[in-house]
Image (cartoon, rainbow, N blue to C red):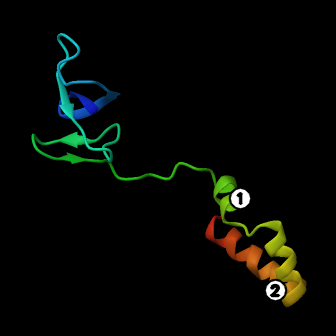
Amino acid sequence: MKAAKLTDNVVTDLWEVPSLTCYEGVTLIAADAFVQMGATYDGTTFTNPPYVDTRTYKTKRADDYPTWQDQLDDIFHNGIDGWKATIQAVKDKYPK
């Protein structure tokens, strides 16, 4: 079972444990699969912190560019100017 260790009602550790009482002196709370580190607990419900995308613009661009096969297909069907427009849209979405 997934268990959360809390400090001031914030999840500071997540463990897979056989029971909630398997560690002497450690209080664990049963946690659903969706619970993440940093989640808050109000006594009945866990609330995960908001997602923050920490990827660099380079990584975001690399993830968003079409595959090289799709880029070649774009050039074949839409010419170099069409391909440039596709690439520029990604560059505009994730500026330096």
Query: On residue 82, which mark appears?
Result: 2
* Location of residue 92 with respect to 6 vertically, above or below: below
For label 1, the residue is: 62
> Image quadrant of residue 65?
bottom right
Image spot of residue 23 (x, y percent): 23, 14
Q: Residue furthest left?
A: 43
Q: Residue furthest front?
A: 18
Q: Quadrant of the C terminus?
A: bottom right
Image spot of residue 37 (x, y percent): 35, 37
> Image quadrant of residue 75?
bottom right
Pointer 1: residues within 10 angstroms few (<14), some, or many (20+)?
Answer: few
Query: On residue 9, which mark appears?
Result: none
Residue displayed at 76% across by 73% down: 87
SS label for mark 2 = helix
Image spot of residue 76 (x, y percent): 90, 85
Image spot of residue 95 (x, y percent): 66, 64
Kind of residue sitting beneath label 1: Ala
Q: Residue furthest top?
A: 24
Seen in the image, is 24 located left or right of residue 1?
Answer: left
Task: Name the foreground residue: 46 vs 2.
Answer: 2
* Location of residue 74 with respect to 29 vertically, above or below: below
Seen in the image, is 32 located left or right of residue 68?
Answer: left
Pointer 2: residues within 10 angstroms few (<14), some, or many (20+)?
Answer: some
Could you tell which of marks 1 and 2 lies nearer the N-terminus? 1
